[in-house]
Image (cartoon, rainbow, N blue to C red):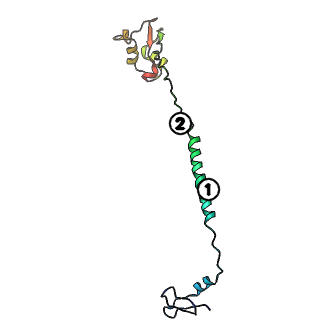
Amino acid sequence: MMQMNCPVCSYQDITGDTCPNCDADLRVIRMLQALPQVPTQSPWPLRIALLLLIIAIGLGVATNFIFSRPQLNTVVITQPSPVTPQKPPEPTTYTVQAGDNLSAIAQKLCGQGVSLQTMVQANPQLIGRENYLEVGQVLKIPHCQEDI
């Protein structure tokens, strides 16, 4: 058996598996020393591989940067579309018939929820005589969707 020094207490020339000074177990160390030596490889292949990796990453980033921004030097000028004012919708009219009253006309043409006042506002000539309509009288019907 080969002599060795204790790695714990530095006792020298130990021939057994236990250090006589500190009782350290030296069997594992002896097994590792009995393994055959592996020749170390040159660091050049590793360095070349790392260099190629760095170059590939650099080129990959550069090409991604170039191809992902094709509009980099392109200036886009858009013309604003002209704004056309909307015409107010044509007023709807209704000719009063026999038996009509203002609230029935409002309900028939505009649906529930349109008040008598809305009809009077659209027809100022009715102020003070909301309950007196003449047969053949033409009334303006308000834009019901705005008033409901």
Circle 1: residue type = Leu
Residue hosting label 1: 52
Q: Nearer the viewer, residue 115 or 70?
A: 70
Q: Nearer the viewer, residue 127 or 101?
A: 127
Circle 2: residue type = Leu
Estimate the x, y position of residue 47 in percent, counting from the top left.
60, 62
**In the picture, which quadrant includes the C terminus?**
top left
Q: Is residue 101 above or below residue 55?
A: above
- Mark toward the start of the polypeptide (1 vs 2): 1
Q: Is residue 21 above or below residue 45?
A: below
| Residue 143, picture quadrant | top left
SS under mark 1: helix
Q: Nearer the viewer, residue 120 or 85?
A: 85
| Residue 129, picture quadrant | top left
Disc ID at residue 72: 2
**Callout 2 crowding tier (Cα within 10 Å): few <14, some 14–19, many ≥20:** few
Estimate the x, y position of residue 69 in percent, counting from the top left.
55, 39
Residue at 51 percent across and 94 percent down: it is 20
Report the side of 49 relative to 114 (left or right): right
| Residue 51, picture quadrant | bottom right
